Image: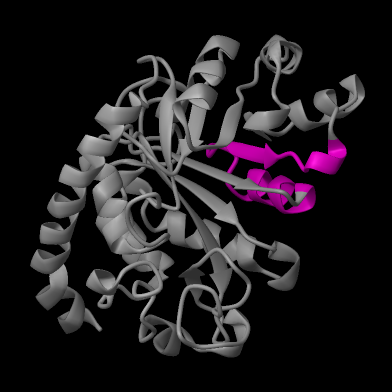
Amino acid sequence: MTSRRATSVWRRIGLALLFLCSATLIISASNLHTAEDVLIIAHRGASGYAPENTMAAFELAERLGADFIEFDVQLSKDGELVVIHDVTVDRTTAFTGYVSQYTLSELQGMDAGSYSNAIFADESLLSFQEVLDRFAGRMGMLIELKEPLLYPGIEEKVAEALKRRAPQLQVAGFGGSERVRAVGKSRNSAAIIIQSFERESIRRMHALLPDIPVAVLVHKDEHPLAPETLDELASYSSYINYSHDLLDEDIVRNIHARNRKVMAWTVRNEKDMERMKKLGVDGVITDFPG
């Protein structure tokens, strides 16, 4: 696998440049830009242009100037961290079945790009380690624990993997001299944020890595959050992240009043981007970074 990655790196760079040109034209046409003080998070990489959660999508996001890449982690049959959104491999590969039915080696051997475009046939599913190897210390990473109730112990595995990367992570008490650069506005901040819909999983991550900010994702059926619920979430989470279509001025104001931040997901057009800017969100998670 290492040899395969090495021999395909220049091909991926070429693909990234090709799609960067296409992306630039599309972005110019839609004027999908944000204010400088809003973090831009590439949803599963630049997934509007390249197959989601692949190296091609992540590298393109970096070239487009995204502050963060967002991606999902689950566990393989042999207990290894793998980057994939769905709990099955059906949608993004030619295989079928649950992620947990395959070993990491088997998952890494799957074509995870052809479903998007044949030009991406060499893009495979990635291990968490591969993503860390490539991007730790280079740009921010918003890591989502996907369905953690299916994977007991996934929090500890993620924590251990990040601890091994401590010198590259700019977090006080965790290999850096600042509190968390993710709460600033600098490009390529190389910071880490961990998010999930599962509250207890996020509580556990906060306990395991108290210097890494965590984010709670809000289900639509939880909206609107009661003041006491917001207080409870703010007691351990740095971010309270909402679907963009649920956000309004009151929600953003109430989150900020608790000295917490809010990211909007998933923004895919200029109209929604402009509305998020006006609401004063702290970050926008988008398929079209740039």
The residue depicted at 70 percent of the width and 11 percent of the height is 249
| Residue 274 in magenta stretch | no
The residue segment tinted magenta is 199-222
Q: Which is more toward the observer, 91 or 238?
A: 91
Q: Assign the N terminus to one quadrant of the image.
A: bottom left
Q: Residue at x 79, y 40 (%)?
A: 220
Q: Where residue 275 appears, x then y in whole percent?
A: 56, 17
In this view, 238 is above or below 23: above
Residue at image position (48%, 37%) is 268
Residue positioned 36% across, 81% down in the render: 111
Closer to us: 149 or 267: 267
Whether 237 is drawn above or below 85: the answer is above
Q: Position of residue 231 (x, y in %)?
A: 83, 23
Q: Is there any visible trace of residue 88 in the rendered image?
A: yes
Question: Residue 216, image x and y in percent?
Answer: 69, 39
Of 80 and 31, the residue lying toward us: 31
Residue 212 is covered by the magenta coloring = yes
**Measured along the vertical axis of the image, is residue 157 above or below residue 216?**
below
**Which quadrant of the figure has residue 257?**
top right
Quarter of the image with the C terminus is top left
How far from the left and from the top, in percent, is residue 167?
31, 46
* Res 180 visible: no
> Seen in the image, is 32 located left or right of residue 10?
right
Q: Nearer the viewer, residue 17 or 182?
A: 17
